[in-house]
Image (tube, rainbow, N blue to C red):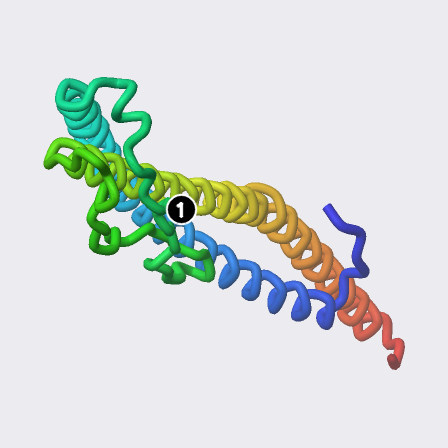
Amino acid sequence: MREVTPTRSTAIELADERKLMRQGYEFLDEKRMLLATEILEQLKIYQRRSDELVAAHNQAAAALAAAVERHGLDQLQLYPKPPPPVLPVSGRSLFLGLPMLSAGAPPPAEPAGQDAIDPSPEAKACHAAFEKLVWAAADLAARAGNLNRLAREYRRTERRARALERVLLPELEQTIKMIDEQLEIMEREEAIRTRWSRSAGIVT
C-alpha cells in the first residue's frame, strides 16, 4: 500500500486514478478476448494449410516418382532447371496493429522443360507439383508467424491485465479505503471537539 496523506483532495485524486485503471483494465480485457478469438481463427487456417501442405508433399512425391520412372534419375537430373519461384507476401493486413501475412496464391506456372531434349508431361507435372509445394510451405510459414505474433501480444496483454486486476487495483482500493476510514475518524474527532467546546462555553 502506498503512503499518502489522508486528505479529501488525495481521496479525489485516487478515485480518479481508480477510474482510469478500471477503464484500462476493461480495454485490456476486451483486447485479450479479441486476440484469443483471432488466435483460434488463425489456428483453424493453420490446420487447413498444414493439411494442404501434406497433400502437396504427397502429390510432389508421386509426381517425382512418375518423372523418374519416365526419364530415369540421371536424365531427370539433367532436365533443364526452371527459374526459382518468386515468393512475395501478397496477403498483408493488420489486426490490432499486428501484421497478418500470407503467401497468397502462386502465379501461373511457366512451362517447364521447353529446351529439354526429351520433354514429357511427367516432368512438367513434377515441376508444377514442387512449385505448389513450395508455395504451400511459404504460406504455412507465414501463418505460423501470425500465430507467434498473436500469442506474444496475448501474453503481454494478459500480464498487464492481471497486474491491474490482481495487484494495482487491489492496492489502490485498499489505499482509498484507508484514507476514507482516517477521514471518517478525523471528522468524528472534530465533531466531538466541537460539541465539547460548545458545552464548555469555549468559542472556536
Pick out the residue farthest to the left: 121
Quick one: 129 or 136, which is closer to the camera? 129
The residue at the point 62 percent across, 49 percent down is: 168
Q: Quadrant of the C terminus?
A: bottom right
In the rendered image of this protein, does residue 201 appear above or below residue 91? below
Q: Tell me residue 14's x, y (percent).
A: 66, 63
| Residue 47 visible from this viewpoint | no
In the rendered structure, the answer to whether residue 165 lies left or right of residue 177 reads left
77 above or below 99?
A: above
Observer-nearest of 19 and 51: 51
Q: Nearer the viewer, residue 172 or 78?
A: 78
Q: Which residue is mark 1?
A: 146
Q: Residue at x 30, y 44 (%)?
A: 42
Q: Secondary structure at mark 1?
A: helix
Above or below for 110 versus 155? below
In the displayed structure, does residue 43 sit left or right of residue 162?
left
The residue furthest front is: 117
**x and y percent of residue 15 in the render?**
61, 65
Where's residue 129, x and y in %? 20, 36
Of residue 164 and residue 98, the one placed in the foreground of this image is 98
Left or right relative to 193: residue 129: left
Q: Tell me which residue sits at (43%, 46%) in the image.
A: 150
Let me know if residue 145 appears in the view. yes
Name which residue lies at 30% across and 43% down: 135
Residue 57: quadrant of the picture: top left
